[in-house]
Amino acid sequence: VEPPLRVVLLARNREGWARLCRITSAAHADALGNRAPVVPWSALREHGGPGLLALLGPLSEPARALSVGREDVAVRLLAPWREVFGPEVRLEAVAQKRSGTGPGSLRL
């Protein structure tokens, strides 16, 4: 079982902070108290944008695709993030000196 996907959203200014608050509220409203809050894509599409930076780490779908050598798939999986955040989406590089090609490995 793969770990859940994760993204870090950073507010760059007041507009970004307001967007982040709306995204967080949407995640909690969607959870209905029955499970941990998860941000739905609909909330990212509606509230994401200028003022926010999206940091996709080693557990993101694009990084997972890169870890198995599928750059073509990584580019495709990165496309929706670019649609929402434009040039303000980044892939986080994490090197934990693990062997192999998975998240945190030196090869990746």
Image: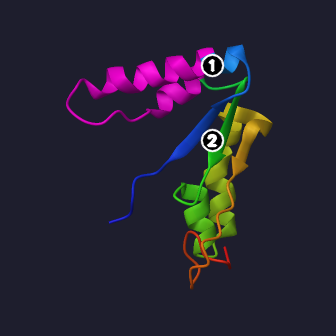
Give residue 7's mark.
none
Residue placed at 60% from the left, 72% from the top?
A: 96
Q: Residues within 10 Å of mark 2 (few under 14, many from 20)?
A: few
Residue 80 pos. (x, y %): 63, 41
- Residue 55 at x, y percent in the picture: 65, 45
List the single residue furthest toward the bottom: 99
Most distant residue in the front direction: 96
Q: Is residue 100 above or below residue 87?
A: below
* Residue at image coords 58%, 66%: 65
Q: Provide the residue span drawn in magenta.
A: 18-47
Classify mark 1: helix, strand or loop: helix
Say which quarter of the image contains residue 49: top right
**In the depicted view, which residue is nearer to us: 69 or 60?**
60
Would you say 57 lies left or right of 91 here? left
Residue 29, position as x, y percentages in the image: 34, 20
Q: Which residue is mark 2?
A: 80
Label tally? 2
Name which residue lies at 43% across and 32% down: 40
Amino acid type, residue under disc 1 in the picture: Trp
Quadrant of the image containing the C terminus: bottom right
Quick one: 80 or 58, which is closer to the camera? 58
Horizontal side of 103 relative to 94 (left or right) equals left
- Coordinates of residue 57 in the picture (x, y in percent): 60, 54
Q: In whole angstroms, how far apart are the C-alphas of marks 2 and 1? A: 21 Å
Amino acid type, callout 2: Pro
> What SS does tag 2 mark?
helix
Q: Earlier in the sequence, mark 2 or mark 1?
A: 1
Q: Is residue 33 left or right of residue 101?
A: left
The residue that disc 1 covers is: 17
Task: Find out whether residue 32 is within the magenta segment.
Answer: yes
Image quarter in which the N terminus is found:
bottom left
